[in-house]
Amino acid sequence: MIDLSDLRSAARSEGGVSRRLFLAYGSALASLPLLASRAEARSRRVSFSADPFSLGVATGEPTESGVVLWTRLAPSPLDPDGGMPPEAVEVAWEIATDDGMRDVVRSGKTVATPQLAHSVHVEAEGLQPDRWYWYRFKVGDAISPIGRTRTTPAPDASPESLRFAFASCSHYEQGYFTAYRKLAEEELDLAFHLGDYIYEGPGREALVRKHAGPKLRTLADYRIRHAQYKTDADLQAAHARCPWVVTWDDHEFENNYAAEISEKEGIDPIEFLEQRAKAYQAYYEAMPLRSFSLPQGPDMKLYRTLRYGRLAAFQVLDTRQYRTDQPNGDHAAELNEAALSPKNTILGAKQAGWLKASLLRSTSSWNVLAQQVMMGMVHRSRTEGGPELYSMDQWPGYAYERMKLVEFMADRRIPNPVVLTGDIHSNWVNDLRVDDRKPEGAIVAAEFVGTSITSGGDGSPTVEGLDALLAGNPGVHFHNRQRGYVLCNVTPKSWTSDYRIVESVKSPGSAVKTLKSFAVEAGKPGVQPA
């Protein structure tokens, strides 16, 4: 067994962090759930004093023949262990073609282990392409709610339409998750969550709701925070209605981190990676992810491809885990030498190579990047006539890599590229050029940036200085700072994005309306009002 104190001493004796040594520790840590999954489950009948399915059910990662079924047993969700005993528990699952669960077409048993907080990730296979299914779990004398899911069309199929939504940034303390409830009512084929599913800060008074616990540090802290979010009935409803595809941003771990680097000075890098391993494990436990995403210590693979027949291919990105440190001290800055350095990367070499290869292999009508931070090179000036300032945490802080990627899509004539983005608690619609500072350049792609579910409170329907911002950034078609999500309807010939706005997140059940709609015509880059 590897002792972490010995690891730290060895790493520091080399004059810095030894990645190889730390990963050795991480690999040992990651092997525990695999060993536990082979353990014999509790054989006697289990009974619970409270509902073990208090966190609901979910599915994700759909293919033409299967889907991941998820739940986590937690009769006491805000306890570190969820109120479960420290032993493996057998869980049965069923998939049916009807919502009454009469025509069961797949079933089986799996093991929920304490090493993974009694979470369940069933990779169900043998389903028919492009159809709806219903599912549930059973453990002891308890039966879960029935959820609905679906498979994707066959790879060579040409579906006539796809209806999905994307969302991000759900801060529990700052509002009610009304937007999630409305997602459940939209009759979606898919839902994408683009990061900041939870927030890591301590509980605060005088807000709409209060986080349980302190600033997140330990594995128990992260587990409790995910569980608190999952107890929300509106979030549970959205998860139970269609499959989700998830990726993270920063707040699932630490604000504005860059790979192994904290935004704060003086943080021990070994301790930072150890904390990252805990955050990543809790994220895996809470999400309907496949086993290839099982964390290996402080590393966890999230970038992947989801295909929807020949209609759309989604490249799901991770712009946090592999990036270099933000230039210019992570402050808004001009596109100076530091921001334009070819040494900067937001993807990392391996992910960047995978992305380009995936785009080249795609035979889909629409090629979508589902990711976290804004790709549009949007600038602001703090004073009239002052310097043009860009966010260094977004793609402009990695401008060289960003321009090379858009140039690649243009040169290789990638069909109909669309970028989906979260992160900044506001709505944007952008045309993307190789260099957005040159409006005479050809438009290559469209970017739809979605606002937050609740983060930032209600926001405002008006934006001070909006006219000047739009005039200074010709590629920006729309900007708004209210809350909500983006609903997308895709056909072989067109893409429409509806910006759905929640009237208020400070009271439950507020009205939702479509504020603006925008369209892209296949084969004709550039966004137009719908």
Image (cartoon, helix red, strand yellow):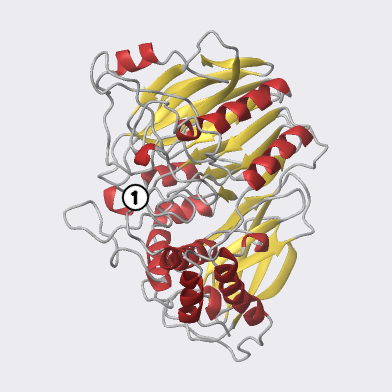
Q: In this orientation, does residue 102 appear?
A: no
Q: Residue at x 65, y 59 (%)?
A: 68
Residue type, mark 1 in image:
His
Q: Residue at x 46, y 63 (%)?
A: 276
Q: Position of residue 372 (x, y in %)?
A: 49, 41
Q: Quadrant of residue 297?
A: bottom right
Q: Residue at x 69, y 16 (%)?
A: 523
Residue found at the far bottom of this picture:
44
Q: How many marks?
A: 1
Residue indicated by mark 1: 171
Q: Residue at x 64, y 27 (%)?
A: 417
Q: Position of residue 361 (x, y in %)?
A: 78, 36
Q: Secondary structure at mark 1?
A: loop
Q: In this orientation, does residue 358 appear?
A: yes
Q: Is residue 197 left or right of residue 20?
A: left
Q: Position of residue 74 (x, y in %)?
A: 46, 74
Residue 181 vertical placement versus 209 (above, below): above
Residue found at the far right of this picture:
156
Q: Quadrant of residue 168?
A: top left
Q: Is residue 399 left or right of residue 201?
A: right
User: For the residue carrying disc 1, how many other residues have a C-alpha within 10 Å: few (<14), some (14-19), or many (20+)?
Assistant: many
Residue 113 vertical placement versus 479 (above, below): below
Q: Position of residue 202 (x, y in %)?
A: 27, 61
